[in-house]
Image (tube, grey):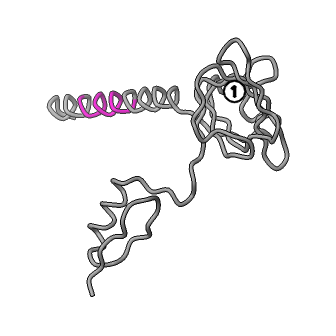
Amino acid sequence: MNPTRKRRLIIVVMVLIAAAVAGGLTVFALQQNMNYLFTPSQVQEGQARSYKTFRLGGMVKEGSIQRSSDSLKVTFTVVDADGAMPVEYTGILPDLFRDNQSVITTGHMEDGHFVATEVLAKHDETYMPKELKDAMAKAHKGRKVAETGDQPPAATKP
């Protein structure tokens, strides 16, 4: 093999190795920032054991919400079809948070209960943000878009 080809081969191999290392580091960094969603029964089965931070999703059990009288600490139970998980949260809860409401909480496990750093409550299924409604109306010129809320109906062409 002549020296020019050998030099080119070495450069190509070095570039491939550098690309593989960069790709591996990128995947590793992205995995550190991902939040996986688990249900209470999956957490109880141990599927979330290897994750430091994850999301817990389910329904707020009726009658389980207990608010502290001297702080913003709230405890409640998130349930799914087969499991229940006690959750502790300190902070202001969303307005839509209530019994029998779908929630997603972000946090970690601590001594057999979930310590949440964020609580998201599911909104009404018929809700549509104004920006999305406007974009859909523009995309479907002349077709009626499903109306929600107190906004006037979209004009339709005769």
Q: Residue at x 46, y 32 (%)?
A: 27
Considering every residue shown, the one lying at the far left of the view is: 4
Considering every residue shown, the one lying at the far bottom of the view is: 158
Q: Report the label total.
A: 1
Bounds of the magenta segment: 11-20
Task: Classify residue 105 as left or right of residue 130.
Answer: right
- Pick the residue in front: 107 or 14: 107
Q: Amino acid at mark 1?
A: Ser
Q: Residue at x 76, y 35 (%)?
A: 43
The quarter in which the C terminus is drawn is bottom left
Q: Is 114 a magenta residue?
A: no
Q: Residue 108 lies in what quarter of the image?
A: top right
Task: Classify residue 107 as left or right of residue 21.
Answer: right
Local packing at callout 1 (Cα closer than 10 Å; few below 14, some 14-19, many 20+) is few
Where disc 1 sits, the SS reads loop
Q: Residue 3 lies in what quarter of the image?
A: top left
The quarter in which the N terminus is drawn is top left
Considering every residue shown, the one lying at the far right of the view is: 82
Q: Position of residue 36 (x, y in %)?
A: 60, 37
Q: Position of residue 89 (x, y in %)?
A: 67, 23
Q: Is 16 a magenta residue?
A: yes
In the image, residue 18 above or below residue 152: above
In the image, residue 35 above or below residue 81: above
Label the magenta part by its dominant secondary structure. Answer: helix
In the image, residue 91 above or below residue 150: above
Q: Position of residue 9 (x, y in %)?
A: 25, 34
Q: Residue at x 64, y 38 (%)?
A: 97
Q: Position of residue 64 (x, y in %)?
A: 81, 34
What residue is shown with label 1? 50
Q: Residue at x 73, y 23 (%)?
A: 67
Q: Residue 17 lies in what quarter of the image?
A: top left
